[in-house]
Amino acid sequence: MTLPNEMRAIVAEGKGGPEVMRLGTLPLPELRDGEVLIRVEAAGVNRPDIMQREGKYPPPADASPLLGLEVAGTIAALGTGATGWAVGDRVCALVNGGGYAGFCAVPATQCLPWPKGYDALQAAALPETYFTVWANLFQMGNLHAGESVLIHGGSGGIGITAIQLAAEFGAVVFTTVGSLDKARACERLGAHAAINYHDIDFADEIKRLTAYRGVDVILDMVGAPYFERNIASLKRGGRLLYIAFMQGSMVDQADLMPIMIKRLTVTGSTMRPRTIAEKAAVARGLLERVWPVLDEGRCAPVIETSFPLAEAAEAHRLMESRDHIGKIMLRVAD
């Protein structure tokens, strides 16, 4: 595969709103040991991209400064020590940065094959949410069949992935959403009940739905405003998993006694700072347990819409509006 000298990429001129992004031309990324170079066809837009653009989520020192945490495309080159793949293989990958570009370098161990029947947009919609959900809900949270789970933000990319996988593996799923349309969409995807937080307090509704037993696991990305109600919604031995703090991380004067009385576990993680080895372990779990499900046509990502790479700013505006259900994608190869 002949490689060009330059690539198209979205560059940010400072920190701020979507208007700071523009389409530019940059050299191809250099490969490190163990990395592959992907000719990108599609990339996902995720909440951390917006935070990075605003200056609130700086990339790790060794990561590309460009936006973009997930891509799909064709392997164009192999770095020294990169194994398991060949030039021309179609892969999707969780990347450490640089996804909004024509080419992206990524550790070979963070790549996964396109599921059967998938195109580039569908494959690129997988890594960020499926890595995050598998690592938190199943590896750290140990959710298993017969348990119940409350998933906040059910209509977003993470929420939709979590609902589908939790239901697929035998859990009873509850979720919170902000509209009737989003509630219906989540119930179609496998949620036992979707709670509109504008109409009812989710903690009161969880008590009603579970006959005051509570749920086994809660996956939360809202943060501080939900803390005490999350604790109240968990049954004895429950697990509260944090993956983001969209409405703040500081909790004032919370009563911690229920954590002791109910023997709760409160934990959290972020994906981007994890080591290559840690991300490789998540990838192996996905390949073994989730990819066969995807190959059979179940638990597919839900895509709201896609934009050409040059319109990345419009994609960010749509995400910020929260007027969408599922993933927002970029068509890089257009």
Image (cartoon, rainbow, N blue to C red):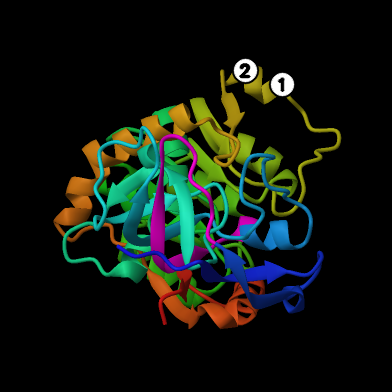
Residue under circle 1? 257
Residue 45 belongs to the span the image colors magenta: yes
Give the amino acid type for the residue marked by disc 2 in the picture. Answer: Ile
- The numbered disc on residue 261 is 2
Helix or strand or loop: what does disc 1 sit on?
helix
Residue 226 appears anywhere in the view: yes
Q: Position of residue 144 (x, y in %)?
A: 32, 32
32 with respect to 16 (left or right): left
**Relative to 330, is 273 above or below?**
above
On the picture, is 208 further left or further right than 221? left
Q: Residue furthest left?
A: 296
CA neighbours of label 1 inside 10 A, class few (<14), some (14 to 19), many (20+): few
Specify whether residue 213 is in view: no
Depth check: give the residue in front, 7 or 283.
7
State the separation of the CA atoms marked 1 and 2. Answer: 6 Å
**Rendered location of residue 9, percent (x, y):** 58, 70
Crowding around mark 2 (Cα neighbors within 10 Å: few <14, some 14 to 19, many 20+) is: few
